[in-house]
Image: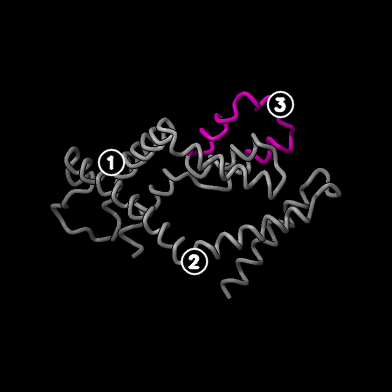
């Protein structure tokens, strides 16, 4: 039942996008189908292939380590407001989470870490790899592919800065893809923030 609801949601969003399109005749349904197929294949690869699952679990472990180190630092500086031992028993699970002292520090740490990884030339090859795949499979431009791929690691504000020299030359359609890619995805920094907020509530 849940799968049917998800499929209906995808179809409804595609129908809404088509209905609001300025040029319905120009919509490439082949590209739409290919995009959906790539999404499904990627989900199967991430969930069903053991080596890939192990790699994802390793990344998850690294993120947990960064979150734990950040919590140790905020606990040292802010005490129980930053995640330290509470001097009382909370009545509502998760109510002890304070965004300013628990959430924002992890965003800052992840932002700094992402910047360092880009500076050390570790993330750029990965971003270029994703960009290459998007260009070859979906036929989008290099600048658009680069911005969309960068959204995996940075937010929708920082990602377009990767293609700042090309922004003025993008067509309306390409600019819309850049904006949609930023709004449809979630940056790694924010993903860690959500994981930190939900950790006490979701096993």
Give residue 86's position: percent from left, percent from top: 16, 52
Proximity of marks 1 and 2: CB atoms separated by less than 8 Å: no
* Left or right of 104 on screen, residue 127: right
Residue 170 in the magenta stretch? The answer is yes
> Is 153 on the left-hand or right-hand side of 74?
right
> Which residue is tagged 2?
49
**Discs 1/3, front:** 3
Residue at 74% in and 53% down:
31
Against 122, is 184 above or below? below
Q: Residues within 10 Å of mark 2 (few under 14, many from 20)?
A: few
**Image quadrant containing the C terminus:** bottom left
How many neighbours does mark 1 have within 10 angstroms: few (below 14), some (14-19), or many (20 or more)? some
Mark seen at residue 36 = none
Distance from Cα at disc 1 to Cα at disc 3: 42 Å
Dot label at residue 169: 3
What stretch of residues is rendered in magenta? 154-178
- In the rendered image, the quadrant that contains the N terminus is bottom right
Residue 34: x %, y % from top left? 71, 57
Which residue extends farthest bottom? 1
Q: Is residue 28 left or right of residue 46?
A: right
Indicate which disc residue 101 carries: 1
14 or 115: which is nearer to us? Answer: 115
Q: Is residue 129 above or below residue 175?
A: below
Element under disc 2: loop
Q: Of label 2 and label 3, which has the lower sequence position? A: 2
- Label 1 or label 2, whichever comes before in sequence order: 2
């Amino acid at each position: 039942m849940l799968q049917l609801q998800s499929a209906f949601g995808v179809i409804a969003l595609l129908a809404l996008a088509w209905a609001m399109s300025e040029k319905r005749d120009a919509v490439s349904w082949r590209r739409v189908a290919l995009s959906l197929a790539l999404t499904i294949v990627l989900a199967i690869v991430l969930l069903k292939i053991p080596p890939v699952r192990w790699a994802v679990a390793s990344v998850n472990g690294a993120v947990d380590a960064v979150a734990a180190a950040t919590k140790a630092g905020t606990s040292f500086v802010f005490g129980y407001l930053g995640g330290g031992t509470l001097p009382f028993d909370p009545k509502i699970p998760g109510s002890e989470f304070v965004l300013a002292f628990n959430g924002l520090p992890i965003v800052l740490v992840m932002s700094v870490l992402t910047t360092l990884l880009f500076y050390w030339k570790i993330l750029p090859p990965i971003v270029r790899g994703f960009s290459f795949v998007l260009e070859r499979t979906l036929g989008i431009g290099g600048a658009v592919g680069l911005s969309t791929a960068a959204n995996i690691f940075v937010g929708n504000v920082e990602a377009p800065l990767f293609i700042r020299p090309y922004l003025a030359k993008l067509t309306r359609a390409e600019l819309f893809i850049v904006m949609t890619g930023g709004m449809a995805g979630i940056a790694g920094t924010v993903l860690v923030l959500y994981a930190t907020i939900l950790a006490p509530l979701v096993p």
